Image: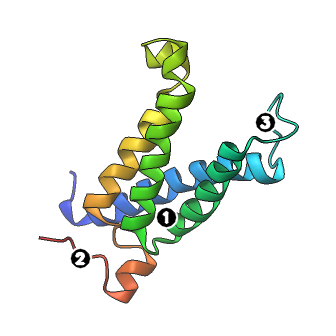
């Protein structure tokens, strides 16, 4: 039986897992960890900016600190990434390798409205209540 009182906790799990995956992209761009991005010896300025957003927002969203604003910024970055880096390779996301950018964009957009969930710094600070 699905218990509705677990919804805020599962929201937290979704937030944490998604943010850690997002953070990994920033770590790859900035520190070549866990591996360098193939073919990228020197990052262009737009990817440096993207890596900063991914590192800062990924960390904040993982912790559940300033979640709504960090998720809004991360969602916007992923929308820009899709339209600048993927759509030019074709319409279908499965073919232009844009599925991750779309999923990140919409999960982060969801977090803007849903908040961070029960297990977050925002919740401990009393800032996680849904806005009405």
Bin the neighbour count of mark 3 within 10 Å (Cα to Cα): few under 14, some 14-19, many 20 and up: some
- The residue where tag 2 is placed is 129
Q: Earlier in the sequence, mark 3 or mark 2?
A: 3
Report the Cα–Cα distance between label 3 and label 2.
38 Å
- The residue where tag 3 is placed is 37
Q: Earlier in the sequence, mark 1 or mark 3?
A: 3
Report the Cα–Cα distance between label 2 and label 1.
16 Å
Q: Residue 121: horizontal and vertical position, in percent? A: 45, 80
> Number of numbered discs present?
3
SS at badge 1? helix
- The residue where tag 1 is placed is 61
The outermost residue toward the right is 41
For marks 3 and 2, give the one nearer the viewer: 3
Q: Residue 79: horizontal and vertical position, in percent? A: 43, 39
Residue positioned 23% across, 76% down in the render: 129
SS at badge 3? loop
Residue positioned 19% across, 60% down in the render: 4
Report the Cα–Cα distance between label 1 and label 3.
23 Å
């Amino acid at each position: 039986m699905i218990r509705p009182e677990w919804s805020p906790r599962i929201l937290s799990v979704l937030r944490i897992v998604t943010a850690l995956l997002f953070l990994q992209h920033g770590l790859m761009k900035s520190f070549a960890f866990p591996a360098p991005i193939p073919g990228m010896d020197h990052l262009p300025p737009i990817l440096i900016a993207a890596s900063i957003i991914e590192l800062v927002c990924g960390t904040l969203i993982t912790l559940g600190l300033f979640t709504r604003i960090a998720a809004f910024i991360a969602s916007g970055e992923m929308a820009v990434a899709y339209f600048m880096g993927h759509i030019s390779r074709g319409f279908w996301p499965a073919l232009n390798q844009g599925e991750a950018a779309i999923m990140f964009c919409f999960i982060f957009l969801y977090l803007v409205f849903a908040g961070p969930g029960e297990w977050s710094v925002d919740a401990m600070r009393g800032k996680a209540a849904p806005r009405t």
